[in-house]
Amino acid sequence: MRRQRRNDPCTSVGCRRLNGDQVFPREWLEVRGPRRAVHGDHVSEAADVIDGPRQVAVQTPDGDTVRLNARHAVAVCTGTSAALPDTPGLDTVRPWTSREATSADHVPGRLAIVGGGVVAVEMATAWQALGAQVTMLVRGDAGLLPRMEPFAGELVADALREAGVDLRFGASVTYVEREDGEVRMTLADGAELAADEILFATGRAPRTADLGLETVGLTPSDWLTVDDTGRVSAIADGWLYAAGDVNHRALLTHQGKYQARIVGAAIGARAKGEPVDDARWGVHATTADGAAVPQVVFTDPEVASVGLTTREAEQAGRRVEVVDYDIARVAGAHQYAEGYRGQARMLVDVDRGTVAGVTFVGPGVGELLHSATVTVACEVPVERLWHAVPAFPTISEVWLRLLETFRGRQQDQMLPPEA
């Protein structure tokens, strides 16, 4: 194990030296017992834990312990793992999580999926298309994709039913067992169900249980709450950072990469005594985590969203105008596919004159998302968007139709009342 040099500004799982003392994270540690760890150019099987302020203890394959002392920062980038419920019998059935569902080497004849969020609908779409008979068990009646605009979950639910998925709302699994090779489930209403495999898509949990957080006054298994520069808020002198899913800001791969870039830059700036620009949209602030998180749900139809939903805007006290448009009415939709079905929603902040959020549902809409992300993140005035001309005949003309709908509504509101 190569020891980190005394003048290194950062101790992180996976570091590389760039131009002298400038050090940035290279790849993140997965806390799963024995694991691969990267330190400089050396790869080994190891276990890394925090062992007091600014200190990381590394256990090598030979059983030795190497303690690395950081002058400036320790970064926790351990991600998350699937959160499983405490359903009786679960430990005996070898349930699938997203990991098994994306690496299985066979198609089960019958697959039960517990959950109604992103992983659940994506895996239902994929496995039904591969030939499995999928049954979705969704607790509660809030519908699919409950954190997105309601019409997104409704359109995805319609498509899943058309594909043959058995979609059941208000269904809670109270007991599971594996017998004669199949998984048998009992539901809260007393109904029974059998499947060849069962996938639990019921959320994520932080990988912080065995990191040694207790040695610095933090609680193992907790999320690590951070400020916009990635500093863990509960550590007074600011040496501990967390980037990626483990901080619970935005559990998406691309947002974790975004955080890593900015947190690495903030660590480097502080180590060199340079000013830290942590103002909104500053060089060292992960502002997009709250204001402009893009996400694509890979179902059929796709769902793409960025910024606020209508519900989130209301909860935040933002006055927004909700503008909807049927994407099938755009000429490019007819070029894309026969019988195209889709929906677009744009939220206009009436006080700021900017777009607060956008949601698209339809085939291929993931490719529209970055234009929406730029619009939201850059807070482009709606009046300026009129000069961003979409090419004909493409689906991107939906932007023009949304603007026309918004302007037409404004003009109607300005008309004098009828005598």
Image (cartoon, helix red, strand yellow):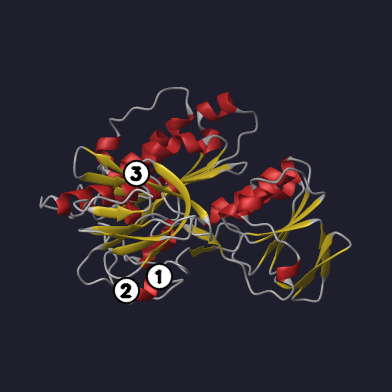
Q: Is residue 140 above or below residue 73?
A: below
Q: In what quadrant of the picture does the C terminus appear?
A: bottom left
How far, Cα to Cα, is label 3 from label 1? 22 Å
Q: Which mark is residue 212?
A: 1
Residue 37 can be seen, yes or no: yes
**Residue at the image point whose x is 81% and y is 76% from the top:** 190
Q: Which mark is residue 170?
A: none
Q: Residues within 10 Å of mark 2 (few under 14, many from 20)?
A: some
- Viewer-nearest residue: 325 or 150: 150
- Viewer-nearest residue: 193 or 4: 4
Reading the image, the residue beneath label 3 is 40
What amino acid type is highlighted by mark number 3?
A: Gly
Q: SS for tag 3?
A: loop
User: Where is residue 73 shown, x and y percent of the image?
Assistant: 25, 58
User: Where is residue 351 shown, x and y percent of the image?
Assistant: 24, 56
Reading the image, the residue beneath label 2 is 216
